[in-house]
Amino acid sequence: MSAEETLILVKPDGVARGLSGEILRRVEAKGYRITDLRMVTASRELLAEHYAEHEGKPFFAPLLEFMSSGPIVAVRAEGDRVIEGFRSLAGATDPTTAAPGTIRGDLGRDWGVAVQQNLVHGSDSTLSAERELALWFA
Ligand code: DAT
Ligand code: MG
């Protein structure tokens, strides 16, 4: 059986703040392997599919606006339990309360805007990982 895979995104705020290297460093330092990587400015269509589960929520439009505002670094990473492991490295969704030691807790904050700008995305299940990897690495 081959190792588990996940999709990691360094969101536009992470790229704009020059934190892509620091974020990928943490992924590699943890022991996960980066097997593919691309920089992409995502279309609304791609983002609407990626975030389909959030359609109808008040932050959906601001989320798409933010995620299409600049380049994203999309990463394919692998390793045993990498999905759970990267979610743990990333920390809680709200960067204000994300634990120190996590990417969002150490590097993120609230900027007083309609959508949380929290630096990274990580797939949350094997099903999402498969679906999202197919979207971003078509
Ligand atoms: P996660 O990225 O931790 O999986 P999610 O899938 O629930 O979180 O939401 C996707 C993104 O939308 C999240 O990274 C930041 C934003 N977001 C989520 N809930 C929010 C809220 N209540 N207010 C503002 N932005 C929110
Ligand atoms: Mg999510």
Image (spheres, grey):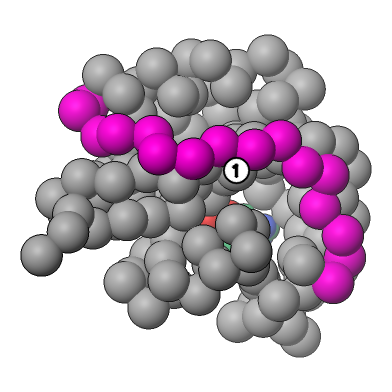
Depth check, front residue: 42 or 118: 42
Q: Is residue 91 visible?
A: no
Q: Is residue 67 visible?
A: yes
Residue 40 part of the magenta segment = yes
Q: Which residues are magenta?
A: 30-45
Place residue 63 in its image quadrant: bottom right
Q: Residue 25, how many percent across, how many down?
A: 40, 17
In this rendering, would 120 be left or right of 111?
Answer: left
Check the picture and name the quadrant holding the C terminus. bottom right
For the point 53% across and 15% down, the residue is 21
Q: Residue 12, how many percent across, how many down?
A: 75, 36
Depth check, front residue: 61 or 86: 86
Q: Residue 52, how many percent across, how many down?
A: 67, 80
For the point 60% across and 57% down, the residue is 137
How crowded is the residue under tag 1: few (<14 C-alpha within 10 Å), some, or many (20+)?
many
For the point 87% across and 60% down, the residue is 43
In this rendering, would 107 be left or right of 31?
Answer: right
In this rendering, would 12 be left or right of 73?
Answer: right
Place residue 134 in its image quadrant: bottom right
In this rendering, would 3 be left or right of 92?
Answer: left
Check the picture and name the quadrant holding the N terminus. bottom left
Q: Residue 27, how many percent across, how many down?
A: 34, 29
For label 1, the SS is strand
Amino acid identity at mark 1: Ala
Depth check, front residue: 87 or 127: 127
Residue annotated with mark 1: 74
Please tell me whether residue 30 is drawn above or below residue 1 in the rendered image. Answer: above
| Residue at the limit of the structure toward the left, as seen here | 1
Depth check, front residue: 57 or 68: 68
Please tell me whether residue 131 is drawn above or below residue 35 in the rendered image. Answer: below
For the point 38% across and 34% down, the residue is 34
